[in-house]
Image (cartoon, grey):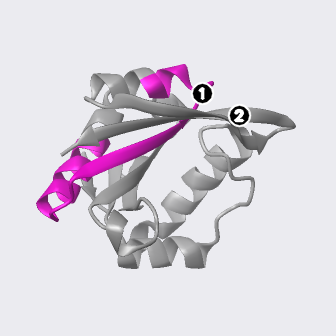
Amino acid sequence: MILAATAEDTAAILRLWNEVIAQTTITFTSTPKTQAQIAALVDTQPVFLARDGARTLGFATYAQFRGGDGYRLTQEHAIYLTEDARGRGLGRGLLQAVADNARDAGNHSLIAGISGENAAGIAFHEAMGFVHVGMIPEAGHKFGRFLDLVMMQKRL
């Protein structure tokens, strides 16, 4: 089930996001999120959850791609799933919820910044209608190595 996150969901989002930060290159950040950061995110941005009963299996959100009013209609999304939830179709529901919400809010496009070594993430975005718009070699650094950043876009 895909639903909008509420303040009661912050602990589950925090736990999931920090696992992704600690264990993967899906995100390039190495700094764990805090409860206050997640509470502010849920309070100010659209955040969607994938749930199986009471268990949160993933979440997705989006925010303006870059600062400045010239970018106000271009959003960048984040989507994270528990390891056991990947490949089960939940990401499709989450990304569709983000795209629908962003489009309904008057936005023009969604951007995805994906680790170059995340072949599954790139294939997923292609299947969801995103196209490659660029690649920034060695844009990130995590776990002692440089990481390419693949940029993808979907017009809404």
Three-letter code for the amino acid on which mark 2 is drawn: Leu
In three-dimensional space, the C-alpha distance between marks 2 and 1, rounded to whole angstroms, equals: 7 Å
Q: Secondary structure at mark 1?
A: loop
Image coordinates for residue 89, horizontal then vertical, percent:
31, 28
Horizontal side of 95 relative to 76 (left or right) equals: left
Q: Is residue 83 above or below residue 58?
A: above
The residue located at (59%, 38%) in the rendering is 26
Question: What span is colored magenta in the figure?
Answer: 94-122
Image coordinates for residue 45, horizontal then vertical, percent:
36, 70
Q: Quadrant of the N terminus?
A: top left
Question: Which residue is denoted by mark 1 in the rendering?
Answer: 116
Query: Contact, CB < 8 Å: mark 2 with mark 1?
Result: yes
What number of labels is visible? 2
The residue located at (35%, 64%) in the rendering is 71
Of 58 and 67, which appears nearest the observer? Answer: 67
Q: Secondary structure at mark 2?
A: strand
Q: Please say whether residue 138 is visible from this viewpoint.
A: yes
Residue 14 lies in quadrant? bottom right
Question: Which residue is denoted by mark 2 in the rendering?
Answer: 147
The residue located at (64%, 65%) in the rendering is 33
